[in-house]
Image (spheres, rainbow, N blue to C red):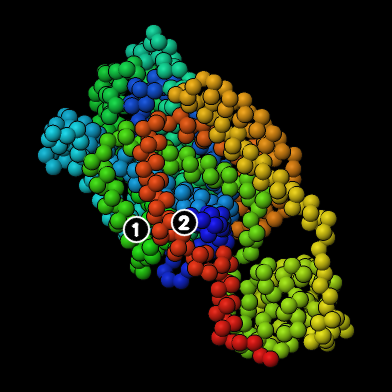
């Protein structure tokens, strides 16, 4: 890519550079809506579809332990999500956090992976509908011909018309509006939780009555060993993507600073509790090697003398899968919209419908693609792809939190609006690289090359800052957030007749104040060490994960990787624990909101768990993901890199573009 391509990978945008002209997403969602979206998006495939497959092939009776490990890792990432989503409420979710904290190239990889995750996630859920509908008619073979799974002659492809039809129905519902979609989800979530509580209660009764046959296996509690348990946890991570969906609705939340962290936390807590409770009951009712991979719950009750219960379970499964499908298809158009607004994808995806306030183009297109995938591909092949996207997003969010706390990006400004006063004086946004004063009026011309944002905060009290504020107030000028910042450093003059008034046209009377060089050097050294430590954590985690989980590698190579990774990881983690966090972190994004506890230990643990689970995924899964990522690299090189708003001269500070336009319209007077 050359020097230009290399620099584009690390260029960052402002945290507030998310909204542009045109129709915006409507703010309709409250905390109850977020919890219902989170639960509805989460509970579905994990319990109703993948329980049978993971128990049979990976975890055995230790399925509950796999759910617990996946839930712990998800909780670590959820706390990181909670802080970033409350500070940076954007439909881009992890993509947006990566763009503002790490760089454009990393953000593209995450965004491209999220596109795959949500499309595949919806397709995976939809494939679980047909077996559950078949329960009501005595088997899938009794379904109407148009809804029945069929094998294409002379191939091994099993098509599922019912899954494709359901995807299209949910896509149409999402196009109606976010408020309507949330109401449908809320109603089905109540039904879903009721059914799962029934499963736990009735299943426990059957277990104590007939004996817990599933736990009386000759090969023990974990027949596939610890690697099987961890591999099952990596696959079951698909069951914990609900809070990711909540974060993607940030721009449609009325009070994101308060409601997003609560919505994420409550949804994850309820879902994890239900998963562990229900899975512990189901694996005890039936031996793991006799579980039905498609309808594990219904068949478990039937084999324990409660055939009538399977109809209740099937009804709950259909409702849960429908809401999970809705939650899987909901975030993807918003990710596409966020990427299109940044110029990395065509503007076709950024269009918002004027009546429904929904990114309708992206919703329709992604719904059609998801329907096609659900029609052609099977569940087991797709679930691993979802885990890669989810774990990668969780990892980068944890990294972004470390970057925010230790090397906070220079983007610390608030949203700005470039406008004019009634007298025609342009209101110029802040930027570290230019003065805040305009050259439109001769009174400001002598100080343009001297005063800048960096020097304003070091000027003596009641100097030029106070006089400028007085003059601006006399002409009706408003400097928006600048006056709030300046009040902390220099008191404002109360009138133009201040006794400290000086001649603005004599630049010799305004010497530039230099910062404390020793303090600046210490801060630069601290940030340099923090950057190296964060990189060291990542390198150490990757090496340790390869050494412990990549069983296909030679033993000596694994020992070498572990011997190098452990000291790197320990040293880097210790450095992060010892050095101070960045003072500028509190200025990043929206004020207030949730602050993640136990930093840096918590995000480091999240990175370690997520990367380890990534390595535990199968080679075939990584090969499929690699094909998608290679395609993404070409799309970025030939479109995204060139059409990026940052590449087109649109600075990470949106106001700078407005400033240039004003300067062009109003040349300086001499």
Q: Position of residue 508 (x, y in %)?
A: 84, 81
Label at residue 362: 1
Give coordinates of residue 302: x percent, y percent.
Answer: 26, 22
Residue for point 81% across, 63% down: 515
Q: Residue at x 39, y 19 (%)?
A: 60
Residue at 74% of width from left, 53% of height from top? 524
The answer to whether residue 193 shows anywhere in this view is no
192 on left or right of 8: left
Tell me whether the residue at label 2 lies in contact with that at label 1, contact meaning CB atoms closer than 8 angstroms: no
- In what element is the residue under mark 2? loop
In terms of secondary structure, where does tag 1 sit? helix
Residue 573 in view here: yes
The front one of 37 and 91 is: 91
Position of the C terminus by quadrant: bottom right
Q: How crowded is mark 2: few (under 14 residues within 10 Å), some or many (20 or more)?
A: many
Q: In which quarter of the image is residue 159?
A: top left
Distance from label 2 to label 1 (Cα)? Answer: 13 Å
Please, is residue 128 above or below residue 648 in the view?
above
Counting from the top left corner in percent of width and height, residue 288 is at 35, 18
């Amino acid at each position: 890519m050359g020097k230009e391509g290399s620099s584009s990978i690390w260029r960052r945008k402002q945290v507030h550079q998310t909204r542009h002209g045109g129709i915006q997403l409507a703010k309709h969602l409250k905390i109850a809506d977020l919890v219902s979206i989170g639960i509805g998006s989460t509970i579905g495939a994990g319990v109703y579809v993948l329980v049978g497959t993971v128990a049979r092939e990976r975890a055995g009776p230790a399925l509950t332990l796999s759910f617990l490990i996946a839930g712990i890792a998800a909780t670590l990432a959820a706390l990181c999500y909670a802080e970033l989503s409350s500070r940076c409420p954007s439909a881009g979710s992890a993509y947006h956090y990566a763009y503002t904290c790490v760089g454009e190239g990393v953000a593209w990889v995450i965004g491209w992976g999220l596109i795959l995750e949500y499309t595949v996630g919806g397709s995976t859920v939809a494939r679980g509908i047909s077996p559950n509908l078949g329960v009501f008619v005595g088997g899938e073979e009794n379904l109407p011909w148009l809804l029945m799974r069929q094998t294409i002659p002379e191939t091994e492809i099993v098509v599922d018309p019912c899954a494709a039809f359901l995807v299209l129905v949910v896509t149409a519902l999402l196009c109606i509006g976010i408020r309507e979609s949330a109401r449908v989800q809320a109603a089905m979530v109540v039904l879903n939780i009721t059914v799962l509580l029934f499963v736990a209660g009735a299943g426990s009764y059957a277990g104590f009555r007939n004996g817990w046959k599933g736990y009386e296996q000759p090969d023990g509690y974990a027949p596939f060993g610890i690697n099987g348990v961890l591999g099952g946890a990596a696959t079951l991570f698909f069951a914990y993507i609900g809070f990711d969906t909540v974060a993607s609705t940030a721009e449609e939340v009325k009070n994101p600073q308060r409601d997003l962290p609560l919505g994420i936390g409550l949804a994850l807590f309820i879902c994890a509790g239900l998963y562990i409770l229900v899975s512990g009951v189901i694996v005890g009712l039936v031996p793991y090697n006799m579980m039905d991979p498609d309808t594990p719950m219904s068949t478990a009750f039937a084999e324990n003398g409660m055939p009538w219960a399977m109809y209740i379970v099937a009804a709950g499964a259909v409702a849960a899968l429908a809401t999970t499908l809705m939650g899987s298809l909901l975030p993807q158009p918003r990710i596409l919209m966020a990427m299109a607004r940044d110029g990395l994808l065509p503007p076709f995806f950024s269009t918002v419908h004027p009546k429904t306030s929904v990114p309708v183009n992206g919703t329709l297109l992604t719904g059609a693609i998801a329907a096609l995938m659900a029609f052609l591909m099977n569940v087991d092949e797709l679930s691993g792809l979802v885990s890669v996207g989810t774990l990668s997003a969780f990892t980068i969010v944890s990294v972004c939190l470390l970057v925010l706390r230790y090397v906070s990006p220079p983007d610390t400004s608030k949203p700005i609006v470039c406008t004019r006063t009634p007298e025609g004086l342009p209101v110029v946004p802040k930027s570290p690289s230019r003065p805040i004063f305009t050259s439109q009026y001769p009174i400001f011309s002598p100080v343009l090359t001297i005063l800048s944002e960096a020097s304003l905060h070091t000027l003596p009290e009641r100097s030029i800052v106070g006089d400028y504020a007085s003059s601006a107030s006399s002409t009706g000028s408003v400097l928006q957030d600048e006056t709030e910042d300046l009040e902390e450093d220099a008191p404002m003059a109360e009138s133009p007749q201040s006794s400290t008034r000086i001649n603005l046209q004599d630049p010799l009377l305004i010497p530039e104040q230099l910062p404390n060089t020793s303090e600046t050097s210490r801060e630069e050294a601290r940030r340099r060490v923090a950057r190296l430590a964060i990189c060291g954590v990542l390198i150490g985690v990757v090496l340790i994960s390869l050494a412990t989980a990549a069983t296909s590698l030679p033993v000596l190579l694994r020992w070498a990787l572990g011997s190098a990774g452990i000291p790197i990881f320990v040293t880097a983690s210790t450095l992060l624990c010892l050095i101070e966090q960045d003072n500028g972190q509190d200025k990043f994004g929206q004020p207030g909101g949730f602050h993640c506890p136990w930093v840096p230990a918590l995000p480091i643990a999240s990175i370690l768990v997520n990367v380890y689970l990534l390595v535990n995924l199968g080679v075939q899964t990584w090969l499929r993901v690699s094909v998608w990522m290679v395609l993404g690299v070409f799309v970025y090189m030939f479109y995204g890199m060139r059409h990026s708003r940052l590449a087109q001269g649109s600075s990470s500070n949106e106001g700078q573009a407005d400033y240039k336009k004003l300067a062009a319209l109003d040349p300086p007077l001499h």
